[in-house]
Amino acid sequence: MEHMESKRCLFCDELVQVKKKGGSEWYFGCICAPGGAYGLREDSVEPFRQLSYTEKRSTFPLLSAYIREQNDNEEAIVLDFEDRGSILQSPQIPVTSEDKGIRLLRYLHRHTSGPNEPLIINHFAQSYNLTYSPNLQEFVYITEKLKEEGFIERIGTTLKLTEKGWLEAAAHATGKVLKQCLVIYSGPDDEVREWMDSVFPRLIQLGYAPKLYEEDRSAKLEMKPIESVLQCVSRVKLVIADVSEATNDLWLRIGYALGSEVPVIMTCKASSEQQLPTGIRPIHYADADELTGLLQKQLC
């Protein structure tokens, strides 16, 4: 039987089983590597211990988060004190609360098979390394912010991605930089869901990160409808606007996009009785599945 001893993980302070192998200490099942393990070079243990309290407080949570994320992605981690600087300065380490929130979305995406599937976060109070946060307070703030923005639902320690959150996570999980795409659609909820289930995933595959702008939610988001969309339009690489029930505001936004040299694809239900201006030739579609194929041809 292999010899195991109990030691505290330097980075999450949890008492766990440790095995020495190949010049490294392997820590099993701590908060840094739940259900797994990570290695720490034996000659690096003391240099890490000798860091000042201030340095430990500012860097150990980040190293814990880095170990956890790599472990969760099934990457073998053997930490060396000499690697500390390059890890902490790596662009992989999120800095803003938005980027930290994306790490939580990606974690939920990896551990669920689809939107609205609940996931219990074991040891929730100690799991702030999921967002590279220094403490529980920031972790809770980020989860609440994601909840307010409609990306997740949370009841206690149980979290689940909404349809919006699943798409956002999928967009960032591809590992490539996606071009921002604004989708302006004001249909009923069931049709919006069809778009998100069919059209949005295909847009992601084609290299776009779709963001849905919903007319009737502008007040809830405490934004002025016209200003908010015009600001969004100026930052994206593509606008997809459904003109099945076009309003004057929608035409304004389409015109603004074209004037800003942002490509615009207009779509329209085949059943629509909307009178379109002369020269407007949208993609006519019967349902979201047909539209998905037509958009793919257009974008390819």
Image (spheres, helix red, strand yellow):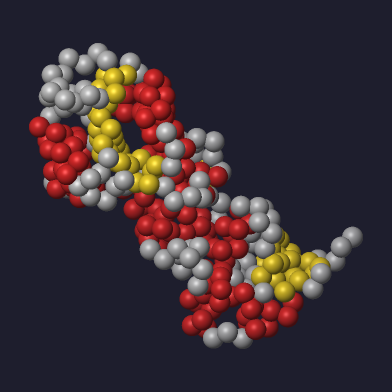
The extreme left residue here reads: 248
Q: Is residue 100 above or below residue 174?
A: below
The extreme right residue here reads: 1
Residue 132 or 192: which is nearer the viewer?
192
| Residue 26 located left or right of residue 170 | right
Note whether residue 210 is visible. yes
Looking at the picture, how far across and down is residue 104, in whole percent?
Answer: 47, 52
Residue 109 or 10: which is nearer the viewer?
109
Determine which quarter of the picture holds residue 11: bottom right
Determine which quarter of the picture holds residue 211: top left
The residue at 55%/45% (across/down) is 110
The residue at 46%/68% (across/down) is 134
| Residue 124 located left or right of residue 37 | left
The residue at 81%/68% (across/down) is 21
Q: Is residue 52 above or below residue 241?
A: below
Quadrant where the N terminus lies?
A: bottom right
Looking at the picture, how far across and down is residue 270, in whole percent?
Answer: 27, 15
Q: Is residue 42 above or below residue 134?
A: below
Quadrant where the C terminus lies?
A: top left
Note whether residue 200 is visible. no
| Residue 110 located left or right of residue 75 | left
Looking at the picture, how far across and down is residue 3, in whole percent?
Answer: 85, 66
The residue at 13%/19% (across/down) is 275
Residue 64 or 214: which is nearer the viewer?
214
Looking at the picture, how far across and down is residue 49, in whole percent?
Answer: 63, 82
Report the number of numbered marks.
Answer: 0
